[in-house]
Amino acid sequence: MGNEEKGYVYILTNPAFRENWVKIGKSSRPVNVRSKELDNTAVPLPFEIYATMCTVKYAEAEKLVHKYIERFTNLRIRNNREFFNVKPEEALEIFYDVQELLDDAEIEVYQDVKKGYKQGTSKVQAKAKSKKEQAKPEEHIFYCKHKESEAMGYLLEDGGFVILAGSKLRSGIRPSLQASLVGKRERFIAEQCDIISGQAILRADYVASSPSIAGALVLGRNTNGWTEWKNAKGKTLSEVYRK
């Protein structure tokens, strides 16, 4: 990209917005400066910082976040604006998916959210705390099945997803798998799996950063983890946890 200075991608909320409206943009300066600039006569109340991602590749990161949000439906409120009809916690999940693709990205959450993050708490800290304290909830097991795979897992309070030991992974990769995830999946299989009769089988429980990353590791293609993982009754993660 040529620019070695770090910048920010941000999620802003506003009490004057509808419940699920957020602004997602980028700034080369601290986000608290940018949010104050946006506090003008066009909005009745100040913006509040929900979360930020700091990275040298902030322009690329912003484009990826926007692309991920619109992958399945058009959630942009106006085509030439950075406002989206999406819950801030769902936008935060996308931040973590994008973080997986960048070497230097750091995420900070500023507002308490229902997944259990506190201001300034990193996802690594929250994930470690959640994994240590949360027992395996057998009644909340979800499945990712394909003719070549059969994986099981469950959602963590912090938005991570545990793929359970013994899960069978689909062989090979598909053209839809994002290039930056190809190497990650290859390392995942080499380091975390046993190969038995040509089938990759997960050796121990593995915490992925999101249901979508977990689905990509299992199936070798891009996935929407919230619809890919289903419980024994056929209900998706989205149907169980978001409705």
Image (cartoon, helix red, strand yellow):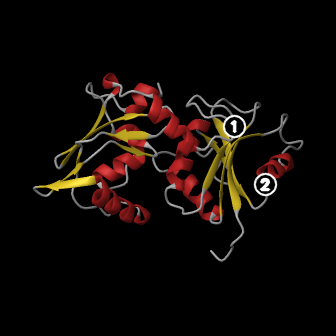
Q: Where is residue 118 in the image (x, y as percent from the top left)?
A: 65, 34
Q: Mark 1 points at which residue?
A: 119
Q: What residue type is labelled 1?
A: Gln
Q: In which quarter of the image is residue 178?
A: bottom left
CA separation, marks 1 and 2?
A: 16 Å
Q: Position of residue 10 (x, y in %)?
A: 68, 49
- At x 88%, y 44%, the residue is 40
Q: Are marks 1 and 2 in contact (CB under 8 Å)?
A: no
The single residue placed furthest to the right in the displayed view is 41
Q: Is mark 1 on a helix, strand or loop?
A: loop
Is the residue marked by circle 2 packed among few (<14), some (14-19), or many (20+) residues within 10 Å? some
Is the residue marked by circle 1 packed among few (<14), some (14-19), or many (20+) residues within 10 Å? few
The single residue placed furthest to the top in the displayed view is 139
Q: Mark 2 points at which residue?
A: 30
The single residue placed furthest to the left in the displayed view is 197
- Closer to the camera in the image, 208 or 177: 208
